[in-house]
């Protein structure tokens, strides 16, 4: 597979603050110093690579050493938080601005759609703007002539094509702009979050067209915040964070999952509760920790997409063992209790043993069972039929878990289904 | 980066004189589109539109005639004063328009430049060509008056130099482009220069034989005076159409040399600025 884009150690710096008459004096100063052979008072002190903070005085490093290779025919989804550097990267690739350091090699023609309707002039009609926009994007007049009918057709606004563009709604605008860009026939196409404006129908059309472009052996770079689009279209995915490519790979699922999990961020967004103030004392059971994990024991984040099994883990401290002590949890969905489960629900032989000291128990919910939604796991503890050790809903201890997306590998299961649970049942011929 | 393997290589710096003329040629349809766009805008947005192109030079010429000829009594090389001033005004208008348009390019079009790549020079080039329309209209006005005066018996003698008009226009275009780009490149960073532009243009006009003939300039000043490339252009124009004016090959030579120098300076600055101006504009 040929590499069509190769980015080597790309750095981009921006100046913060107001750029104005202050810099004229600085520039003159520097120039004079250089002329005299003395030291430039405004030069930067070289810092070891990898040790720069992103912001240094009035300079901001938007990109800090990006290394990336894109193969022909790849549909690369670029995701990352706002301010990570995605748009800057695209701007440099589109040659709208230049890098501060590093090089990029490109094979083939690039067409960028960084904004919709670039260069649309309000006074001109849709048709005239097709010519203008097409020319700006690099098509020759002849090319546009040949493709005019296709473009008008794709846009779906043939009736309005001869009205001045200032009369268009934003949806029509997007349709026309994308229609022109889609027919550019570039070898590499770069799209930056432009689909947010169109309706679902149009989005489908665009994604379809991008998929078509890719299947013809062209390469697409797609920046979006809509994970569904990324999942359905992209063959590979890269996360950009703080000016660096954090990871890139072909397992789009996993990478998107990582990104979502991470964008939930810190401890607050992990499905975990810890007894930090050392409260909730009870001789028979003092709740220490309550968390959700996968089968390997890793704490889940509060938003998960596809999941296998969920394990509910409870850790508690016992000073005196009491056989009637039960600890468990309620599972709530929108204030309705789906079920409650306790450690002594099964027959006695299956109960986990309780000893003095720290006890760690867990229970498994099967994967592919719960439907999409936000669940509340609420722990409780009780001495059976005698007293509450930890009454649910009173103490306000809760773990929220949002399940969203990718319920099944079936191509016919996309989007949220009705129903409170969503088991993936097996079907077979009798 | 292996140059043979890649079609485009993006690097932090370019060479000093790197203009990709091939690329500009490839985008020639775009230049046509810009011209068309500006023309349509002009036509659709104003009522009198093209008429202003006539009213303005007429007005200026009349004012000049009254002030400089009647009141200040400045001689005009034996040419009817009205024609003298009009010839200067018409030529100067084109030059001033070129500078104005070009120097505005980056700041006025920052939004397009920031979103899509196309050779930046296409815009000023389109502007300079677009201005020819304005010149054409004013030129016809001038010819009209010239014929009128000739029929009245004025001592006018159009010469073969008329054929040099395209060369004069080209030179003004290049000069306007060069100076405009210099100013444009500088104003992306230091906006103050934009305000200075108006003053610079005005002073320049007075340093050119628009309201007085070259013959009036004292000998000791001439060497410095001739460093102004517009001097030769204006005098040549008058000589060609009206018959009198000071023309010499050395003047033309100096004029072209300075024009090319300014153009080179413009291109130089432009290259340094082009790729990163979007960050500071």
Image (cartoon, helix red, strand yellow):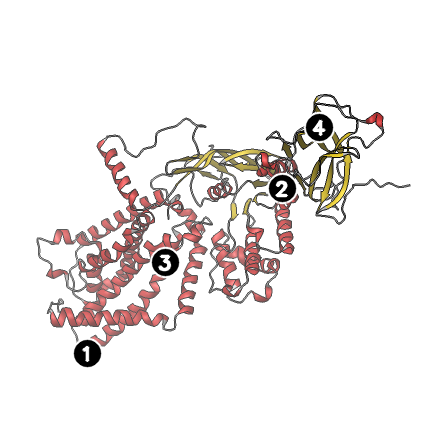
**Which is nearer the eye, B148 or B10?**
B10
Residue pointed to by mark 3: B127
Q: Which residue is mark 4?
A: A285
Q: Chain of mark 1?
A: B
Spatial CA distance of label 1 from label 4 is 119 Å
- Describe the element under mark 3 as helix, strand or loop: helix
Considering only order in the chain, which callout, 4 or 2, is on the residue closer to the N terminus? 2
* Residue contact at pointers 3 and 2, CB within 8 angstroms: no
Label 2 vs label 4: CA separation?
50 Å
Q: Quadrant of residue B276?
A: top left
Vertical placement of A41 versus B124: above or below?
above
Measured from the top left, where is residue A39 in percent x and y? 26, 30
Discs 3/2, front:
2
Q: Secondary structure at mark 2?
A: loop
Extreme-front residue of the structure: A386
Which residue matches tag 1? B152
**Which residue is denoted by mark 2 in the rendering?**
A234
Is the C-beta separation of discs 2 and 4 under 8 Å? no
Percent x, y of residue B39: 40, 64
Query: Along the horizontal axis of the image, is A103 left or right of B73?
Result: right
Q: Residue at x 62, y 52 (%)?
A: A203
Q: Nearer the viewer, mark 3 or mark 1?
A: 3
Chain bearing tag 4 is: A
Compared with B124, A336 (above or below) is above
Q: Earlier in the sequence, mark 3 or mark 1?
A: 3
**Is there any visible trace of residue A304 in the rendered image?**
no
Distance from label 4 to label 3 (Cα)? 83 Å
- State the separation of the CA atoms marked 1 and 2: 80 Å
- Do the residues at discs 1 and 2 belong to one chain? no
Q: Are marks 3 and 2 on the same chain?
A: no
């Amino acid at each position: 597979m040929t590499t069509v884009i190769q980015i080597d150690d790309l750095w981009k710096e921006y100046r913060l603050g107001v750029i104005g008459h202050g810099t004229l004096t600085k520039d003159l100063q520097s120039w004079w110093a250089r002329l005299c052979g003395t030291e430039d008072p405004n030069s930067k002190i070289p810092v070891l690579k990898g040790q720069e903070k992103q912001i240094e005085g009035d300079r901001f490093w938007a990109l800090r050493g990006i290394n990336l290779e894109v193969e022909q025919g790849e549909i690369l989804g670029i995701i990352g938080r706002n301010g990570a550097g995605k748009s800057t990267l695209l701007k440099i690739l589109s040659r709208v601005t230049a890098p501060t350091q590093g090089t990029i090699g490109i094979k083939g023609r690039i067409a960028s759609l960084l904004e919709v309707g670039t260069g649309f002039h309000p006074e001109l009609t849709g048709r005239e703007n097709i010519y203008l926009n097409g020319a700006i994007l690099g098509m020759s007049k002849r090319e546009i002539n040949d493709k005019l009918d296709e473009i008008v057709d794709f846009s779906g606004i043939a009736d309005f094509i001869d009205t001045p563009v200032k009369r268009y709604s934003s949806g029509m605008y997007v349709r026309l702009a994308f229609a022109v860009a889609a027919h550019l026939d570039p070898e590499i196409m770069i799209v930056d979050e432009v689909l947010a404006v169109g309706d679902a129908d149009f989005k489908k059309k665009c994604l379809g067209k991008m998929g078509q472009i890719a299947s013809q052996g062209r390469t697409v770079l797609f920046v979006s915040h809509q994970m569904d689009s990324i999942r359905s279209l992209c063959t590979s995915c890269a996360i950009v964070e703080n000016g660096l490519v954090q990871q890139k790979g072909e397992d789009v699922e996993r990478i998107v999952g990582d990104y979502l999990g991470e964008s939930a961020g810190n401890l607050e967004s992990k499905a975990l509760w810890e007894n930090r103030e050392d409260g909730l004392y009870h001789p028979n059971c003092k709740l220490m920790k309550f968390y959700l994990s996968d089968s390997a024991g890793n704490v889940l984040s509060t938003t998960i997409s596809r999941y296998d099994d969920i394990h509910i883990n409870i850790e508690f401290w016992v000073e005196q063992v009491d056989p009637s002590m039960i600890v468990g949890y309620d599972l709530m969905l929108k204030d309705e209790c789906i079920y409650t489960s306790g450690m002594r629900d099964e027959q006695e032989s299956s109960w986990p043993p309780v000893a003095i000291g720290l006890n760690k128990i867990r229970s498994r919910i099967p994967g592919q069972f719960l439907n999409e939604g936000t669940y509340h796991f609420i722990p409780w503890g009780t001495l059976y039929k005698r007293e509450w050790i930890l009454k649910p809903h009173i103490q306000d201890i809760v773990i929220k878990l949002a399940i969203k997306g990718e319920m099944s590998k079936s191509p016919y299961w996309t989007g949220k289904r009705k129903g409170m649970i969503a088991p993936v049942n097996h079907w077979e011929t009798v | 980066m292996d140059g043979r393997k890649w079609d485009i290589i993006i690097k932090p710096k370019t060479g000093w004189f790197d203009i990709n003329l091939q690329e500009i040629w490839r985008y020639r349809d775009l230049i046509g589109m810009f011209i068309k766009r500006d023309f349509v805008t002009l036509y659709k947005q104003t009522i009198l539109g093209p008429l202003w192109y006539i009213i303005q030079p007429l007005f200026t010429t009349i004012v000049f005639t009254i002030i400089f000829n009647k009141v200040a009594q400045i001689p005009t090389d034996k040419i009817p004063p009205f024609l003298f001033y009009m010839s200067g005004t018409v030529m100067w208008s084109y030059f001033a328009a070129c500078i104005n348009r070009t120097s505005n390019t980056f700041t006025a079009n920052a939004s397009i430049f920031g979103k899509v790549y196309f050779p930046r020079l296409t815009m000023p080039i389109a502007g300079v060509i677009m201005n020819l329309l304005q010149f054409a209209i004013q030129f016809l006005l001038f010819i009209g008056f010239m014929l009128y005066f000739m029929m009245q018996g004025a001592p006018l003698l159009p010469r073969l130099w008329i054929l040099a008009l395209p060369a004069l226009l080209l030179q003004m275009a290049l000069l306007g482009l060069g100076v405009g780009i210099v100013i444009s490149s500088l104003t992306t960073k230091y906006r103050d220069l934009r305000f200075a532009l108006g003053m610079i243009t005005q002073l320049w006009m007075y340093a050119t034989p628009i309201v007085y003939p070259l013959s009036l300039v004292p000998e000791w000043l001439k060497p410095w005076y001739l460093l102004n490339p517009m001097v030769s252009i204006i005098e040549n124009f008058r000589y060609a159409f009206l018959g009198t004016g000071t023309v010499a090959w050395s003047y033309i030579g100096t004029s072209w040399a300075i024009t090319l120098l300014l153009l080179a300076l413009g291109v130089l600055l432009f290259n340094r600025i082009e790729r990163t101006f979007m960050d500071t504009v």
